[in-house]
């Protein structure tokens, strides 16, 4: 299986080759076509299986034909449990966004640092990568709006629940439009995760990769 055959554009395939990525991982093979097809996806695969690129690449492809016009209205929201993951995901978006023919603004926000520069940074944002607490603070300050979100990703959803972010996640969900694509990624499928996936996902394609990788 090649990246070409998954439906990514030649610019993305070239960019992948430039980064020495020659072959998709199993989760990428299954998730990329489903996400390109605008399906909701529940992706369960162990840590290190390549879940980040499995959603970043198709979501950037969606931005090819659609970028929002309203200022401070993000188009895509990626919720993550920690600052470290926010930075990692941001790096992957920045690596591949030059494959688009127009600029896309991706921003990562998290707690533990001053909020003021982050508030200014919401100007023209397209993809917002955020930890739940800091995102709620930005929403309280009217620094960013979520009414134009077309895609929601919950990355490391198991960890978000373990860290006690359930109530904050619910609060964030109430800001989102009902019609959107939802992607939930996790290393494990716990009972808690089952309950959140029922709230967040609608008729999802379930991709569960067993330990062979
Ligand atoms: P996960 O989120 O499943 O824990 P990551 O997305 O963080 O995994 O990826 C783990 C590592 O695998 C990263 O260093 C990433 O660059 C690498 N990786 C991702 N996809 C591929 C691929 N198709 N080929 C080779 N390495 C890959
Ligand atoms: Mg991950």
Image (cartoon, helix red, strand yellow):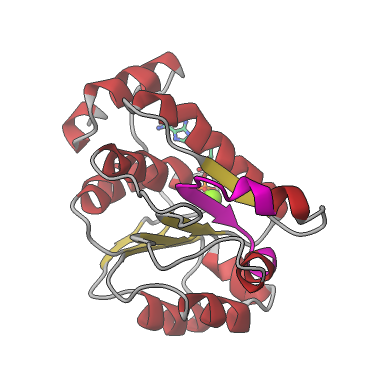
Residue 85 seen: no
Left or right of 92? Residue 24 is: left
Q: Position of residue 13 (x, y in %)?
A: 30, 23
Q: Which residues are magenta?
A: 119-134
Q: Position of residue 200 (x, y in %)?
A: 39, 76
Residue ID at (56%, 52%)? 129
Residue ID at (58%, 45%)? 107
Depth check: 52 or 117 in front? 117
Q: How many marks?
A: 0
Residue 53 in the image: above or below residue 40: above
Residue ID at (29%, 39%)? 61
Residue ID at (60%, 57%)? 130
Depth check: 116 or 77 in front? 116
Left or right of 102? Residue 73 is: right
Image quarter hosting the C terminus? top left
Q: Position of residue 94 (x, y in %)?
A: 51, 32
Depth check: 97 or 188 in front? 97
Residue 74 seen: yes
Q: Position of residue 176 (x, y in %)?
A: 42, 73
Left or right of 7? Residue 190 is: right
Image quarter hosting the N terminus? top left
Magenta stretch holds residue 10 = no
Left or right of 118? Residue 56 is: left
Residue 140 in the image: above or below residue 79: below
Residue 202 in the image: above or below residue 210: below
């Amino acid at each position: 299986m090649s990246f070409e055959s998954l439906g990514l554009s030649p610019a993305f395939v070239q960019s992948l080759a430039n980064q020495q990525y020659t072959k998709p991982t199993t989760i990428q093979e299954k998730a990329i076509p489903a996400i390109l097809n605008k399906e909701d996806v529940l992706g369960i695969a162990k840590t290190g299986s390549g879940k980040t690129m499995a959603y970043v690449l198709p979501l950037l492809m969606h931005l090819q034909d659609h970028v929002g016009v309203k200022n401070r209205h993000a188009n895509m929201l990626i919720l993550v449990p920690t600052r470290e993951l926010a930075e990692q995901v941001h790096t992957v978006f920045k690596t591949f966004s030059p494959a688009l023919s127009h600029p896309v603004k991706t921003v990562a926000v998290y707690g533990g640092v001053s909020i003021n520069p982050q508030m200014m940074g919401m100007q023209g944002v397209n993809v917002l990568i955020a930890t739940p607490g800091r995102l709620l603070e930005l929403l309280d300050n009217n620094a960013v709006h979520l009414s134009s979100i077309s895609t929601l990703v919950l990355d490391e959803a198991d960890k978000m629940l373990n860290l006690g972010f359930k109530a904050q996640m619910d609060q964030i969900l109430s800001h989102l439009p009902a019609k959107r694509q939802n992607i939930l990624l996790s290393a494990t499928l716990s009972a808690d995760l089952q309950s959140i996936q029922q709230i967040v996902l609608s008729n999802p394609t379930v991709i569960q990769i067993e330990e062979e990788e």
